[in-house]
Each structure stands twice: as structure tokens, then as C-alpha cells.
Image (cartoon, rainbow, N blue to C red):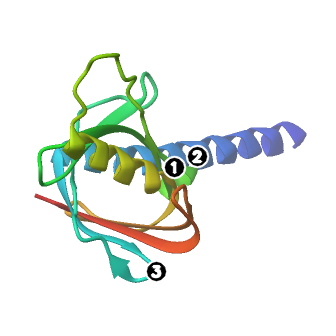
Amino acid sequence: MKKSILVLSVAAVVILVVAACSKTNQRTKRLIKAGEWTVTELSVDGTNEAELPKWDITDCDPYEAVCIGKWENEEGGHADFAWQFNNNGDSFIISHQAEEEHEGEEHDHAAEEAAEQAYNFSGTYTVDEHSKTKMKFTTTSAVGFPGQSVVIVIEKK
């Protein structure tokens, strides 16, 4: 009897872990599969940013490498950001990846703007909506806007 209970308990834990990984993997694959996403809302306390970027997401295996995307603005500037789904796919993390500046390099204003925006909107978000063509993320702990309500909505281009 004790062995049966132990076996059933272990099986239940395995099923829960597989289901959790499955949701995270499903959402990761949806984001990767689309390639390019248009940011249709990037708001702080209900005020949308004047310039909305697009995200270029490349294929990756989150279990083997850090997933990197490009945060691209209308002027052609871009910044790299790491991203990842966590907590059974219910959390989404964005982390701006700063590039080292080299002495003598010309500063690109558009790239600096993209980097600043990516940095300010870095943080851990709750996944409020997730479909093949649209995702919505919310937080009150974005790096550049602590305590303020931040919303990011992306749609498949």
C-alpha cells in the first residue's frame, strides 16, 4: 500500500512538472515562431510611448542558451535584450543587454534611444494574454518605472 501511494505521488509530481514545462515551452515557441512582433502598446500608467518599437525574435532553446531579441525603433536603432518565460509560462522577463562602448566609436543616437527604452522597460512581467498572434504583459516593477503600471502588448507582424 505504501509503495502504491509513493508511486502515485511521484507520478503526480512528474505530471505537474511536465505540464508546467509544457506551458513555458508552448509560450516560448509561440514567441520564437513569429520572428518579428510589432509592439502595439508600450504604456506607463495608461500613457502610451510616442515611439513604439518592434521586436525581432530569433530561434533559441531556452534550456541551452539565453534567448536574445532585438528591440528596434523607427529610426533604425536597435538594442539587444534577453527574454524568458518562467513560472509555468505565467511570467515573462525582459533584460536589456548593454553593449560595451569602444573608444573612438561614433555614437548612434537611434541605437542609444532603443537601448534606453529597452533598459527602462526591463523587468519581470505577468503574462495576461498569450495567443499565436498577440501577447500582453503587465508589471509594476519595470526598471525605469518602479511602482508604475507598465503594459506591453505585442502582435505578430
The residue type indicated by label 2 comes to Ile
Specify the label residue 45 is tagged with.
3
Q: Quadrant of residue 8?
A: top right
Quarter of the figure with the N terminus: top right
Inter-mark Cα distance, 3 to 1: 34 Å
x then y, percent, for residue 154:
26, 63
Q: Which class describes the residues within 10 Å of circle 1: few (<14), some (14-19), or many (20+)?
A: few
Q: Secondary structure at mark 1?
A: helix
Residue 130 appears in the rendering: no
Question: Looking at the image, is mark 3 or mark 1 earlier in the sequence?
Answer: 1
Q: Are the residues tagged 3 and 1 within 8 Å (C-beta)?
A: no
In the foreground, 81 or 59: 81
Rendered residue at 55%/74% (across/down): 148
Rendered residue at 46%/27% (across/down): 63
Residue position for label 1: 19
The correct choice, above or below, for 70 with respect to 103 in the image is below
Q: Secondary structure at mark 2?
A: helix
Residue position for label 2: 15
Inter-mark Cα distance, 2 to 1: 6 Å
Inter-mark Cα distance, 3 to 2: 39 Å
Residue 132 appears in the rendering: yes
Rendered residue at 50%/43% (across/down): 21
The correct choice, above or below, for 63 with respect to 144 in the image is above
In the foreground, 75 or 39: 75
Specify the label residue 10 is tagged with.
none
